[in-house]
Amino acid sequence: MVELLTFKVDSITFENRVENGTEIKLAKQFSYNVNYFGEENRCVGKLDFRVNDEQLRPFSIRVEIQALFSYGEEDEREDIHTQSFEQLFPFLRQIIHSTTAMSGVPGLIIPAVHIDKNNVKVADKVNEEETPLN
């Protein structure tokens, strides 16, 4: 069973230079990677998420966030990848909503995003270093 232990925001970048009343259509881009740490059954998920205007007007928000997870011996890496993302994503949504709402624009609520575990690529490399969230 995958369990979120803690998370931290590495960076938030927000730009809003569109004129009031401008209608924008938003697009999202993201990457999510999971790094495993030795025999401890712990891993770190790193999410880089960006929302910007499809027509490249000066509106964007980018959040880089990482989280520490524990998992069970029976968990497969593809499941760890998808389940850890599912647990971290609501915090990302709230961060984006709060940041935009406190910046004088309507709070942006991004739609839920799900990762298909069939599209997850797993590497055999295991990182033996300390986790960056310790």
Image: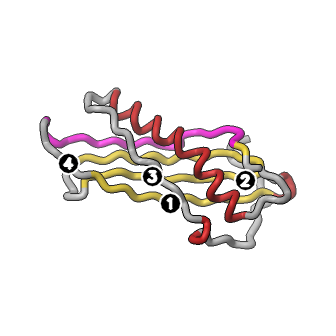
Crowd tier of the residue under label 3, counting other residues whose Cα lies within 10 Å: few below 14, some 14–19, many 20 or above? some
Q: Position of residue 53 (x, y in %)?
A: 25, 53
Residue underneath mark 2 = 43
Disc nearer the start of the sequence (1/2): 1
Q: Position of residue 37 (x, y in %)?
A: 78, 56
Classify residue 132 as left or right of residue 28.
Answer: right
Residue underneath mark 1 = 31
Crowd tier of the residue under label 1, counting other residues whose Cα lies within 10 Å: few below 14, some 14–19, many 20 or above? few
Q: Say which of 133 and 99 sits in front.
A: 99
Vertical placement of 105 versus 120: above or below?
above
Q: CA distance from mark 1 to mark 4?
A: 23 Å
Vertical placement of 83 versus 22: above or below?
below
Q: CA distance from mark 4 to mark 2?
A: 37 Å
Q: Position of residue 57 (x, y in %)?
A: 19, 52
Magenta range is: 4-20
Disc nearer the start of the sequence (4/2): 4
Magenta stretch contains residue 46: no
The colour scheme used to paint the residues is secondary structure
Residue underneath mark 4 = 24
Crowd tier of the residue under label 4, counting other residues whose Cα lies within 10 Å: few below 14, some 14–19, many 20 or above? some
Residue underneath mark 3 = 49
Classify residue 82 as left or right of residue 48.
Answer: right
Disc nearer the start of the sequence (1/4): 4
Disc nearer the start of the sequence (3/4): 4
Tag 2: residue type? Cys
Q: Dot 4 lies on which element?
A: loop
Q: CA distance from mark 1 to mark 3?
A: 7 Å
